Amino acid sequence: MAITALPPDTDADIARVTEALAMITPRWNVRILLALSGPPLRYSELAAKVSWLQNGQLHPKLKSLCDAGLVERTEHTPRHVTYGHTERGAALLPVLPLIVTWAEEHLEKTDRPLPAIEQIEDSLTLLTRRHAAAILWVLKSREEVSGRALARIVMPSSDWTNVYPPLRQLVADGLVDTEGTGQPYRLSAAGNGLGPVLGALSAWSAGQPLNQAAHHPVWGHPQAKPTPMPWVSSQSRPAPTSIPPARRGESVPAWHHRDLFSHASPARLMAAIPAGGPRR
């Protein structure tokens, strides 16, 4: 069922990316995926790596990740069960450094450098705003659009004025620009810079290699950057300071981030998580 008035292929593309974001954005999901980098773990081993999760919190999180097809549960014997990435889950991990690269360039700087995991979580919060993906798609492809025209495209079955709450939020987040009431909307520098992230998520969600992001019909063609509007990251939280590299043989878009992740390993990643866990 179409969710926008865009062509079916574009509508399906937006729906897949929205679903992919919904898989990884819930609290702790990315941290659990990172903790599972490496050999499969028993439940107790995984629980020790994410010790800030209280009793009863880890199991439903694992179940949701298994249901999403990112984590697999393997029962070797009734008393020997392990958890590890599926191929789909492992293929998603190389998207995370792209998010960090975008965040470091476009999110407002704080009084201390934020760990990579916090950059990812802050960024995902912005991208999962309601109707955010559809609005960003339309503005990227059409450059400038009025609020009324945007509403007819993004939410054709709703009152057109309902587009303004998500639009105002995206302006406040620094992803969208406008010169004022009644003026058209356009992507900001930060919104325009999301091409590698959204292109990679589109490729992953369609089951394609991530290097296909460069050929995305909307996000694969960079445009001139408008004036940036910074967004303030959420309250700082203790977190891992690195992300594991892609597994051998995986196709990953080239990116440069001062070699932040070039020598990361699961052991170093989890050693960077302080006891007691992060706070929201």
Image (cartoon, rainbow, N blue to C red):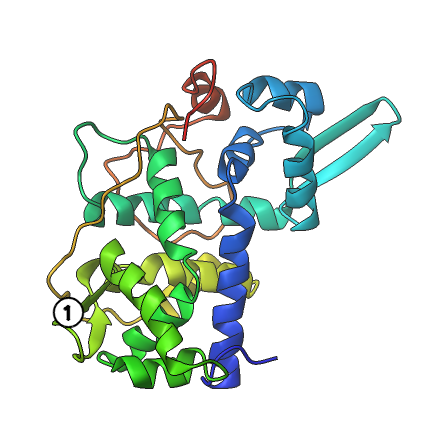
Front residue of 135/163: it is: 163
Q: Mark 1: which amino acid?
A: Ala
Residue displayed at 49% across by 63% down: 17
Residue 138 against residue 133 in the figure, above or below: below
Residue 73 against residue 171 in the figure, above or below: above
Residue displayed at 47% across by 15% down: 276
Count of marks placed on residues: 1
In the rendered structure, the answer to whether residue 157 lies left or right of residue 83 reads: left
Asked whether residue 161 is in view, the answer is yes
Q: What element does badge 1 sit on?
A: loop
User: Residue 162: horizontal and vertical position, in percent?
Assistant: 39, 74
Q: Quadrant of the N terminus?
A: bottom right
Residue denoted by label 1: 224
Residue 80 against residue 216 in the figure, above or below: above
In the rendered structure, the answer to whether residue 32 lies left or right of residue 174 reads: right
Residue displayed at 30% across by 48% down: 255
Q: Residues within 10 Å of mark 1 (few under 14, many from 20)?
A: few
Toward the right, the furthest residue is 78
Residue 230 against residue 218 in the figure, above or below: above
